[in-house]
Amino acid sequence: MTNRDRAALFDEVVSAQAPWSGLVRKGQTLRITDTEGCQAVDTLFYRADDMGERYSSQDTLRVQGSAYVTTGTKLVSNEGRVLATVTADTCGRHDTSAGACSCEANTVRFGHATKYLHACRENFALEVAKYGLSKRDIPPNINFFMNVPIDQDGGLAIVDGVSGSGDYVEVTAEMDVICVISNCPQINNPCNGFNPTPIRVTLWDKA
């Protein structure tokens, strides 16, 4: 039986530019759907009963030996444990190197006029505060659906996304985790096609 054949525990639309968070218990599967295409979804995972243990992009890259996240990728914590595994992916390209946009980074990259535009780091700060955390507790994140080629010299570039309407990624929890999402509000680079759009989050219980 596939996830599509089973009743979901929840199925929610996250508005353009908005944050979201929720508990995903061990064995449950969370699907993130890019409803309109070309929408970056900045995502973090924390161990639910000890949020000091959290997603580590560095350890995930080291363990996988790959620069990108896709089906089969184990999302590794700063303690070296597997928080979750990517179990389905219709897009095939997800970044975990470029990090989250912030008001400060926007100012440096795009000029002082962008300083007060909403950004992912601010979304994360709003959402993790619900769990007693602060900006200091926001590590480098996954950017689902964001296309970040790496050139031969190791340089990164954020370019037009490759995800289409309805593309999704599914993540199955290997322990109880808190998932925190910023539905990226960036309008100054192509990660959202210069037009942030809604996403959908759906949770299924373990089969």
Image (spheres, rainbow, N blue to C red):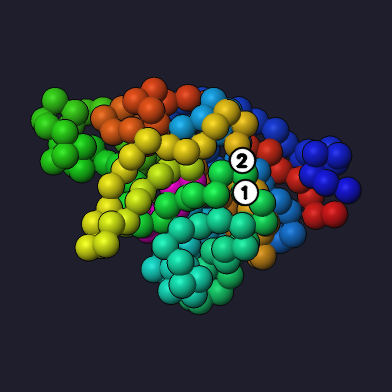
Front residue of 52 and 175: 175
Q: Residue at x 13, y 41 (%)?
A: 108
Given residues 81 and 169, the one toward you in this image is 169
* Outermost residue toward the left in this view: 112
Q: Residue at x 28, y 47 (%)?
A: 157
Counting from the top left corner in percent of width and height, residue 172 is at: 68, 56
Query: Relative to 114, does residue 148 appear above or below in the rendering?
Result: below
Region in magenta: 137-144
Residue farthest to the front, as pictured: 152
The reply to whether the magenta stretch includes residue 142 is: yes
Marked residue nearer the N-terminal end (2 or 1): 1
Image mark for residue 89: 1
**In what element is the residue under mark 2?**
strand
Q: Are the residues at dot 2 and dot 1 in contact (C-beta closer than 8 Å)? A: yes
- Magenta span contains residue 118: no
Between the C-alphas of marks 2 and 1, the distance is 6 Å
- Residue 158 image label: none
Q: Is residue 133 left or right of residue 102?
A: right
Name which residue type carries label 2.
Answer: Tyr
Residue 103 percent coordinates (x, y): 23, 37
Q: Is residue 69 above or below residue 65?
A: above
Q: Position of residue 199 (x, y in %)?
A: 55, 31
- Residue type at mark 1 is Asp
**Residue under the image location 76 percent in, 45 percent down:** 204
Q: Residue at image x 62%, y 44%? A: 90
